[in-house]
Image (tube, rainbow, N blue to C red):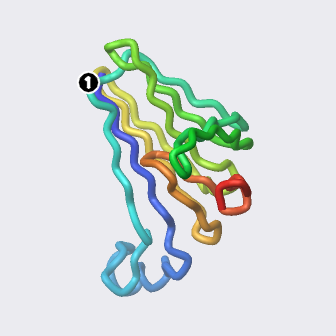
C-alpha cells in the first residue's frame, strides 16, 4: 500500500468570508489558506500503520559531534510498518494539531494533518513538528 502524509500550517489571516465573496470559497494569492505545506511519502509502501495520541517521541541526533536523545511528550505519533519490515515514525505536538483527515482505499493511504495557525512549531527533522513550548530546553 502506498502512503503519503501532508502537513498543512493553517494561515491565521485566511478569511473564509473573503474567499466566499470573491473566489467562490476558494483561497487566492492574497488570501492563502495555508502558510506552508509539506508532503512526505513512505518509500517502498507500507503493510500497516498506527496512530497514537499523547505519545512520547524520542528525538535523536548529534550535537557538537555527541549523540543525544530527548523525550518529547504529548505527541501525535504516526508509525508506519514498511514492506521491508522497517518502521518509520512521524510526530506532531498534540497542542499544534488543529485537525487530521485519513483517506484510505485498497492500495493507498493519504493522511492530512492541519497545524494550528497560532502555535509556532520547530521542524528538527522531516516529518517531526514540535511546538516551541514542548521543544527540549537542552537543545535550544
Residue that lies at the very extreme toward the front in this rendered image: 65
Where is residue 68 drawn, in percent x and y?
61, 40
Q: In front here: 26 or 21?
A: 26
Left or right: 16 in relation to 36: right
Residue 5, image quadrant: top left
| Residue at the spot 50% in from the left edge and 73% down from the top edge | 11
Residue 134, image quadrant: bottom right
Examine the rendered structure and indicate whether residue 46 appears above or below residue 66.
above
Q: Which residue is mark 1?
A: 44
| Residue at the spot 28% in from the left edge and 30% down from the top edge | 43
Where is residue 124 drawn, in percent x and y?
51, 53
| Residue at the spot 54% in from the left edge and 24% down from the top edge | 50
Q: Quadrant of the C terminus?
A: bottom right
Left or right: 115 in relation to 118: left
| Residue at the spot 45% in from the left edge and 85% down from the top edge | 18
Mark 1 packing: few (<14 Cα in 10 Å), some, or many (20+)?
Answer: few
Q: In front here: 4 or 63?
A: 63
Q: In front here: 106 or 39?
A: 39
Where is residue 95 drawn, in percent x and y?
70, 55
Amino acid at each position: 500500500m502506498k502512503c503519503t502524509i501532508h502537513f498543512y500550517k493553517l494561515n491565521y489571516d485566511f478569511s473564509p468570508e473573503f474567499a466566499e465573496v470573491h473566489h467562490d470559497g476558494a483561497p487566492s494569492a492574497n488570501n492563502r489558506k495555508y502558510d506552508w505545506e509539506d508532503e512526505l511519502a513512505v518509500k517502498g509502501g507500507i503493510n500497516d500503520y498506527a496512530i497514537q495520541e499523547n505519545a512520547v517521541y524520542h528525538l535523536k541526533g548529534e550535537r557538537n559531534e555527541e549523540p543525544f536523545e530527548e523525550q518529547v511528550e504529548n505527541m501525535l505519533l504516526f508509525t508506519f510498518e514498511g514492506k521491508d519490515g522497517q518502521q518509520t515514525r512521524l510526530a506532531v505536538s498534540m497542542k499544534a494539531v488543529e485537525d487530521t483527515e485519513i483517506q484510505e482505499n485498497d492500495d493507498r493511504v493519504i493522511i492530512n494533518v492541519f497545524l494550528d495557525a497560532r502555535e509556532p512549531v520547530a521542524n528538527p527533522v522531516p516529518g517531526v513538528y514540535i511546538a516551541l513550548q514542548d521543544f527540549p530546553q537542552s537543545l535550544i
